Amino acid sequence: MTHLPTSTPDERSERATRPRDIRGWLFDLDGVLTPTAIVHMHAWSRLFTPYLEAHGAAPYTDADYFAYIDGMPRYDGVRSLLESRGIHVPEGTPADPPEADTVCGLGNRKNAAFNETLADEGVAPYPASVAFLDAVQAAGCLVAVVSSSKNAPSVLEAAGIADRFEVVVDGAVAAREGLPGKPAPDTYERAAELLGLPTTACAVVEDAESGVKSGAAGDFGLVVGVDRGVGRDVLERLGADVVVDELDELIPDLDPNRKDTT
């Protein structure tokens, strides 16, 4: 069910517009187009459950994933979680082996666990998200994927939707171009630029707290929150203009002849 914020129009950002006015849709990947957030959650748990136990820290929980990791670049997620437990390790470099006790080593260990799980289990896109993707492309809109993960291309391939997106701004692109990751808006702004559209003509579609923050921090036409467990109240508070349980709820709002109702 679609939920609009309960605040008045004057209290909401003036940038908010209607879905049918959007010309470019910028999709997060994990948790929006594909259920790979579950794969990520399992991989992070496999990393941090024994690690925190060995350090005598508070046990790792799913709540930690949403609070400190979800939507962030991998090394930022490691750093954020460790800081929450008062654990400090050297930064290291991306070339660190997975067994290294550094931020980068731990991030690489998590990445290995993710790829193993993806190869074992595979992934299929959310049917409702594919239906919405079909609808926006049929309406002539442009689309892009914006993901903090460096695994975005392999996930898109595994899900069978790689050919739908000519523009993919993932963690590898962000690192190569020196773009700060979510919750900064820069990766979404870069995707809009690559589509040849102003940010005001684009919608950010996110399920993560950090991702919604990045959409709210930029001058985007619309920020759509997909509630996969964070909670619609949280997504609205962080800046989502519209919150849905599934993206196909927005398909009727793409109709240019649809009359607004109150």
Image (cartoon, rainbow, N blue to C red):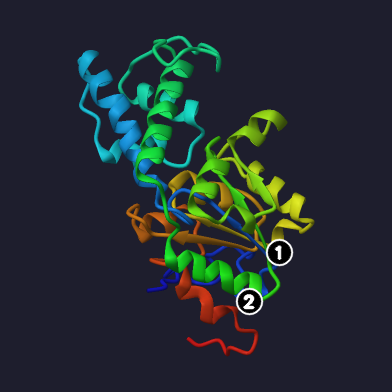
Q: Give the vertical position of 168 relative to 246 (above or below).
A: above
- Where's residue 3, x and y in %? 41, 71
Q: Give the vertical position of 224 relative to 84 (above or below).
A: below
| Residue name at image x 42 percent, y 25 percent | 78
- Where's residue 117, x and y in %? 36, 37
- Where's residue 235, x and y in %? 42, 56
User: What residue would you read off at disc 1?
Assistant: 201
Q: Indicate the quadrant where residue 176 lies.
A: top right
Give whichever of 9, 114 is nearer the camera. 114
Query: Label 2 is placed on what type of residue?
Result: Arg
Q: Is residue 63 left or right of residue 96?
A: left
Q: Give the vertical position of 114 relative to 18 (above or below).
A: above
Q: Indicate the quadrant where residue 202 lies.
A: bottom right
| Residue name at image x 34 percent, y 32 percent | 44
User: What residue would you read off at disc 2?
Assistant: 20
| Residue name at image x 35 percent, y 52 percent | 230
| Residue sitting at the far front | 120
Q: Secondary structure at mark 2?
A: helix
